[in-house]
Image (cartoon, rainbow, N blue to C red):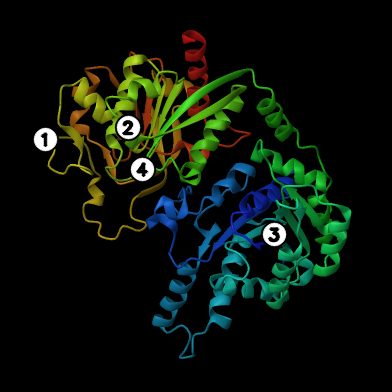
Amino acid sequence: MKTKFIFVTGGVSSSLGKGIAASSLGCLLENRGLKIAMQKMDPYINIDPGTMSPYQHGEVYVTSDGAETDLDLGNYERFTSSSVSRINSITTGQIYLSVIERERRGEYMGRTVQVIPHITNEIKSRIVTVAKTSEADVVIVEIGGTVGDIESIPFLEAIRQFSHDVGKENVLYIHLTLIPLISVAYEQKTKPTQHSVKELRSMGIRPDILLCRTSKEMSEDMKDKLALFCDVEKEAVIQALDIHTSIYEVPIQYSKEGLDDIVVAKLNLKKKKKRLVSWESILEIERNPKHSIEIAVIGKYIELQDAYKSLYEAIKHGGIANESLVKIKRIHSGHLTLENYMDDLKNIDGIIIPGGFGERGIDGKLLACRYGREHKVPVFGICLGMQCMVIEFARNICGLNEAHSTEFHEETPHPVISLLEEQKTVRNIGGTMRLGENEIVLNQESISHKAYKTMTIYERHRHRYEFNNSYIENFTSRGLRISGIYPDKNLVEIIELEDHPWYIGVQFHPEFKSKPVHPHPLFKSFIKKSIEYNLNNK
């Protein structure tokens, strides 16, 4: 096999940033002209995170083909040009389900089904599928969890076997670990990393490179010590300093540390290094912005950073496109009331109302829609946010006082948002929403068309409820423009207000297609209009 394979594992602690590390390495290898593909292996037994609470898992990232995946796949697409699909996301649940279904069909010919070889073979086959499908020079595979977790053992065994299957010269193991700083003595400690590597080696995996997450510069003596005790070459002990400005600095930091040089040398990849010009430009804009604005995000999971991971990044990308620093004011929608919403929103330059599920916090979202509509503040509603814009318009402009979504009020006399027809017979909740990318045709007179600069777009969805077309005439006669339609089923995808500078709601999730080097057109347009609002009103 011509493809090379890099496996990224984590040790000592979770949340060290394996996804960012893997994505940054992918960025560096692409910068050298290599074609890369990326894959995530999650050790939980769920088939996917689609039925998990944001408080458990954070954001569910949706791929073009409709897979509900881990948020790290969003990092893969933001940092690289590699596209991800359902084959790039693996869970323990998927692996066991596949093996059990084969057993039921009799494909194992009466043999006893075991973790080795059947589970590990299934894991390895998923890795090979990505390599063959993508025809990549390098496949980077991130193993979720932390070395020592019981759930991760089958995946670690599978990647141990993999070097025997394809040849050790085609495989590289990178171990991301923590170098803790003892605050009392202000001293770094290598012992946790030594134990983590010992645990990894007990499973038959010898790391080729150590990525050492640290809040303080590592001394040469520390690198010598880690190289000696972990049996790793000193130049392969790479410090990964904490980043306090932008995650888009990580590829540049790793490049300076020589990570890609070591990887290319160890895997015998003959590719020249180039300057990360586009990434350097991004950092320059972030360090020296021409403007500064504040955007309110009105969410129901606002206390959890990862619940809106792609959204926050897309906002940042819109700022980069407009050379602006964007400060985000996180407002819990459940805390907005008639008594306080005017004060909480009065100094805001733009409002974003993101997606979500359930009735909690809906009243606060409706108040935010009303404020933005009445005060001509730019408003961007996404999925549930768009539905709230429709409900608020129906109540306060169309006089349909009891208008609601049937998700929250099944007996509402005015179901302006209702269940999609194909959802009415659905019983299982996992993987059954309207998911993935669909075609949308734009209204040529709309702000959305001016932003996209094309008539046909493709965007990703994750929802069950939809705009009720029975109310189109009522709404459009009062100034609500239908700006985008899914032509196959005549579903409303985008709404705008005709007498408002920027009041747009979309049923899809544009944040999933935004990159720092290619900001999404709607986020770029929204931030531009928010800057204008700031300049004109302050």
Pointers 3 and 4 in contact (CB under 8 A)?
no
Of labels 4 and 1, earlier in sequence is 4
Q: Categorize mark 1 by other alpha carbons within 10 Å: few (<14), some (14-19), many (20+).
A: few
Question: What residue sits right under mark 3 in the picture?
Answer: 177
Quarter-of-image position of residue 5: bottom right
Look at the numbered discs 2 and 4 and tell me whether their residues touch, using CB distance below 8 Å: no
Say which mark, if any, is on residue 114: none
Q: Are marks 2 and 1 in contact (CB under 8 Å)?
A: no
Pick whichever of labels 2 and 1 is earlier in the sequence.
Answer: 2
What amino acid type should be assigned to the residue bearing mark 2? Lys
| Sequence order check, earlier mark of 3 and 2 | 3
Closer mark to the observer between disc 3 and disc 1? 3
Amino acid beneath label 3: Thr
Quadrant of res 132:
bottom right
Question: Disc 2 and disc 4: Cα gap in Å?
Answer: 11 Å
Q: Which residue is mark 1?
A: 413
Crowding at dot 4, Cα within 10 Å, few <14 / some 14-19 / many 20+, comes out as many
SS of the residue under disc 2: helix
Between the C-alphas of marks 3 and 2, the distance is 41 Å
Asked whether residue 269 is in view, the answer is: no
**Residue 241 in the image: x percent, y percent?**
73, 46
* Gap in angstroms between the C-alphas marked 4 and 1: 23 Å
Q: Which mark is residue 365?
A: 2
